[in-house]
Image (tube, helix red, strand yellow):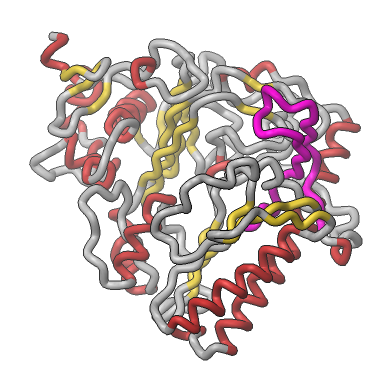
Amino acid sequence: MSSSQEDIPEPAGFTNSDFLLDPFTYNYLNSTFQLKGKEPRSYEGGYSTDIMSQKAQSLLRDAVIAEKPFFLTIAPIAPHGNINMNGSALDDNPVFEHTAPVSAKRHEHLFQGVKVPRTQNFNPDTPSGANWLLELPQQSPENVEYNDHYHRQRLRSLQAVDELVDDLFAELEEYGILDNTYVFYSSDNGFHIGQHRLQPGKSCGYEEDINIPLIVRGPGVAANYTTEIVTTHTDLAPTFFKLLGIPLRDDFDGRAFPVTPDAIESTLSTREHVAVEYWGYAGGEGIYDRTLHENNTYKAIRIAGPTYNLYYSVWCNNEHELYDMTKDPGQMNNLLSPTAEPAFLVAGYPLEKVASRLDSLLFVLKSCKGRVCREPWKNLHPDGNVSNLEEALSSKFDDFYEVQQNRVKFDYCWNGYVPEAEGPMWEKHGFFLRDGLPWHTWV
């Protein structure tokens, strides 16, 4: 929302709201909020997360007074970078400054000496990844030092978020509803700092950007229980519906995920994939590289099962990536690169065999809707004899996957979602779509 658009319609579905407004959304010390039905209010000099904490407590209090079931969403900006922006769009404002996150003063002294973990893929001596990443220069010592500072500022800014969460739980306990309330804690994206020589940012499909926390507390949820069950953002709404006893909608792309230990263990084998996609530019944050890297549109899939743990992607320039995340968690050896180290087997199967199955799965998922997203293997095998990658790797399906199936491809790169650029697409009943026309029209 923009503070210059005071007459915009109020968001549907909420009884109350108090939104951050652009161009001040990501300014830690000069935020502007708009309470539903009220004029925008500036909080210059106040710390954004602390202000949001107070507003969250106020909304919670209103919900408790109403004595009805409630759904409260709280979205602090930390640890996002700080943005000072004068104007409503990048094209017409004279000032746009993107700096490291800003912490509350009470946290400025914390995490002295902490550095970005020096993992295998941190500022490597040789380029890694694909596409434009292969052209990134190795970062200088000064650049690395700045990125360590950026990392510390992220940690410091998160301390106020921790306090917000603590205060929220204290309020729930005081109202006597803590044990009857589900709390979900997550993030909209991950973040990379220095991995694959990348400047601070979040626009890639690598593990640092897509593997995010999900913490759940509530009735029936075991304390201190950790699971590797595969979930994604589109699973949240169905999960909320199921917990509340609301019938699931058939147009949901996601599936409700279990929150109790027994239910989790019984569904591990049925949840294996997450679709990942991005359109447009990739921009670095901080002071060392503000280049908007073009050709950053890609489709990808992250898939994990009892005997495999893989990442597969197709970029808009039609470069491909495949990483065995068990052997190569830093994603340094792209098995589909012409210069890759030889890999005759992936998860115990020939490389080409695995890649063909992953590409077909991605072909279905890249434009899916509703049930097709939830049951992609069933759309490839309507008789139901395949429900996961391991079953699809049976040799009896070699011709089906390696010869008969179309491939994920792009006709050209574009900095936005343009279906016409994304080649053939999967139609609801198993046919292909291209340029909005069914496949039989073309053939």
How far from the left and from the top, in percent, is residue 44? 81, 54
The residue under the point 16% across, 9% down is 442
Q: Is residue 122 visible?
A: no
How far from the left and from the top, in percent, is residue 189? 56, 46
Q: Give the left or right position of residue 144, taking residue 324 as reference.
A: right
How far from the left and from the top, in percent, is residue 340? 54, 20
Q: Is residue 279 visible?
A: yes
The residue under the point 38% across, 73% down is 261
* Magenta stretch holds residue 133: no
How far from the left and from the top, in percent, is residue 276? 44, 37
In the image, is residue 59 above or below residue 441?
below
Q: In which quarter of the image is residue 121?
A: top right
The residue under the point 75% across, 47% down is 27
Q: Give the left or right position of residue 406, taking residue 333 as reference.
A: left
The magenta region covers 76-103
Report the number of discs. Answer: 0
Q: Quadrant of the C terminus?
A: top left
Viewer-proximal residue, 129 or 275? 275
Viewer-proximal residue, 349 or 206? 206
